[in-house]
Image: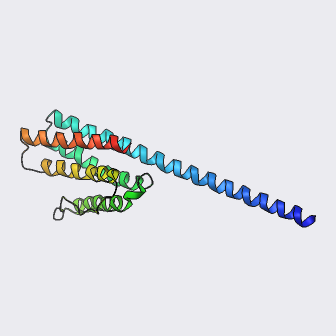
Amino acid sequence: MKHLLMSLCIIYLLSACKDQQEQQSTATQQSQEAIAQQSLTAYEGLAWKVLTSLQAESDQLMVKEAIDSLIHSSESLFLAMKTQLPECEASLLVMADYVSKMKATKAVQSAPMELTPTLPDFTEPRCYHAQQLLLNSLAVFAIAEQAAMTEQDYHQAKLKMIDSIARIKQLN
């Protein structure tokens, strides 16, 4: 009888530990998803800022600063999205690394980087949407880096940013 009672106590303690681990795991996952959602919302706000400056045909320096902020914020976005899009982890890591290298290159003022990173093939549409966030931003960055932006350049850049905002909606 003693052994049966002892066995029941041990089983009860083990199941309580398992329940606690599952609760902690769920809480951690929810926290990571909240961080990814906050990063996506912040990114969307910066994308709207870039689009607004393009629509107003703001001075080229303002456009450069806005797109630069957007690109720099994307590193944390891509890292945060790993939990939300596990099927895209390879792409997200490559994109975060690319943005990190882009920041470092700009900081030391060395030769400009290639503006089209080599990205892994994607298997899911959501991976494509995530990749396009970076590629559209880099296209606008390249346009803003020109000696002078024409009306056609502003139009082309606006279309890229509108596409990015639509892709953000697809990732929500």
**In which quarter of the view is residue 49 placed?**
top left
- The residue depicted at 29 percent of the width and 44 percent of the height is 167
* Residue at the farthest bottom position: 3
- Rendering coords of residue 127 (x, y %): 33, 54
Residue 63: where, in percent of width, then height?
18, 42
Q: What coloring was used for the rendering?
A: rainbow
In the rendered picture of this protein, how many numbered marks are placed on residues? 0
Toward the viewer: 120 or 76? 120
Q: Residue at x 52, y 51 (%)?
A: 29
- In percent of the image, x 74 and y 61: which residue is there? 14
- Among all residues in the image, which is located at the extreme top? 56
Point out the image quarter for the C terminus: top left
Residue 119 is left or right of residue 9, and the answer is left
Q: Classify residue 38 by image quadrant.
A: top left
Is 97 situated left or right of 37 in this image?
left
* Residue 163, x across and y down, in percent: 23, 42
Q: Position of residue 83 (x, y in %)?
A: 45, 54
User: For residue 50, what is the image quadrant?
Assistant: top left
Q: Foreground: 62 or 42?
A: 42
In the displayed structure, would residue 12 be above or below residue 136?
below
Residue occupying image coordinates x 19% and y 59%: 116
Q: Work out which quarter of the rendered image holds the N terminus and state it.
A: bottom right
